[in-house]
Image (tube, rainbow, N blue to C red):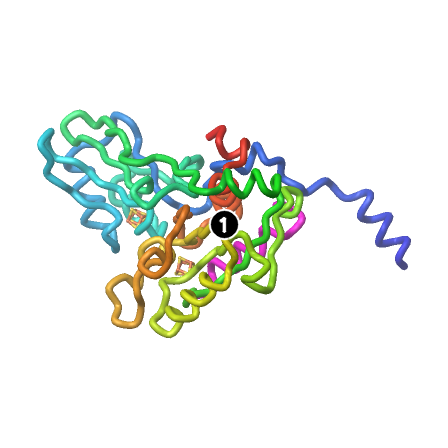
Amino acid sequence: MILDVAARSFKSAKVLIPVEQLIGNCAGSRLPEVAPGQLTPAAAAAAVEACPTSALQLEEAACGAQLVLDYGECIGCGACAEASPLAFAPARLLPQFGVSRSGLVRRWNLATGAELPADDPVTVGIGNEILALMGRALNIREVDAGSCNGCEGEIVALNGPHYDLERFGIHFVASPKHADMLLVTGPVTRNMTEALRRTYEATPSPKLVVAVGACGCSGGLFHGSYAVTGGVDAVIPVDGFVPGCPPTPAMLLTGILRVIGSPAARRL
Ligand code: SF4
Ligand code: SF4
């Protein structure tokens, strides 16, 4: 019996996905990308009208009207691509994972269709300090601060044979006292606010915090509800944000590696 299982596993195809195929890969998340040259004021207005959150907005600036896309508020519903299929399409590769909150925001000039430079594209935070101390080994404590568990499903997949987070020396631990990084999901419900604050205090320094999902970045669909604080950075300092509802394992991996300053993530 056990020999049959061993024989089958030797014969089965390799399932581990190479890291080069994972970094920045957001296929399946339905986060939108704007098609260069296809963005017109009418297409932008239709997409903004269709967007169920404030992820897409029109703004007036000194250089003219702008379309603002905040991935931190995007739930990947695909409504913008349905409303303006030429100008919007699901993205397959993005660098906005593990960046600062303002790094999740992109802008386009509606007169020219050209993208404007981001305010703050990448932050590495104190990741280099942890790298110097520990090489690439990293212990993560996952904190569910009111998630629907969609994000947890993707985090669990990170430990499976396809993504194999442990190949990077990254492990999940049961106590914040053993953690270098907190991976926080959910819009931080009022009931979880104090628990999250205490978990942060119980984590030894130097420590990193990654806010996961639209909920962790901004409160997501629950933004503005009386029952949530609305984003992890409203309660504790955050070193990097990973948008998506939920983010795929590849997006989570990219965000974690970027925040710890991995050379693989720096190639983005
Ligand atoms: S995919 Fe994101 S940006 Fe597009 S309509 Fe949905 S929430 Fe808005
Ligand atoms: S971001 Fe989406 S999947 Fe993640 S906890 Fe919030 S609602 Fe659920």
Q: Is residue 118 above or below residue 147?
A: above
- The residue wearing badge 1 is 206
Q: Residue visible at 51% across and 59% down?
A: 203
Q: Position of residue 206 (x, y in %)?
A: 50, 50
Q: Position of residue 253 (x, y in %)?
A: 53, 44
In the picture as drawn, the residue positioned furthest to the bottom comes out as 191
Q: Residue visible at 57% across and 38% down?
A: 132
Quarter of the figure with residue 218: bottom left
Q: The N terminus appears in which quarter of the rendering?
A: bottom right
Q: Is residue 247 above or below residue 194?
A: above
Examine the structure image and report whether residue 159 is included in the region drawn in magenta: yes
Q: Position of residue 113 (x, y in %)?
A: 21, 28
Q: Residue visible at 66% across and 43% down?
A: 167
Q: What kind of element bears circle 1?
A: loop
Quarter of the figure with residue 66: top left
| In the image: residue 267, left or right of residue 59 | right
**Along the line of sight, which residue is nearer the eye, 5 or 180?**
180
Looking at the rendering, the quadrant in which ligand 2 lies is bottom left
Q: Amino acid at mark 1?
A: Pro
Q: What range is drawn magenta here?
A: 148-164
| In the image: residue 220, left or right of residue 151 | left
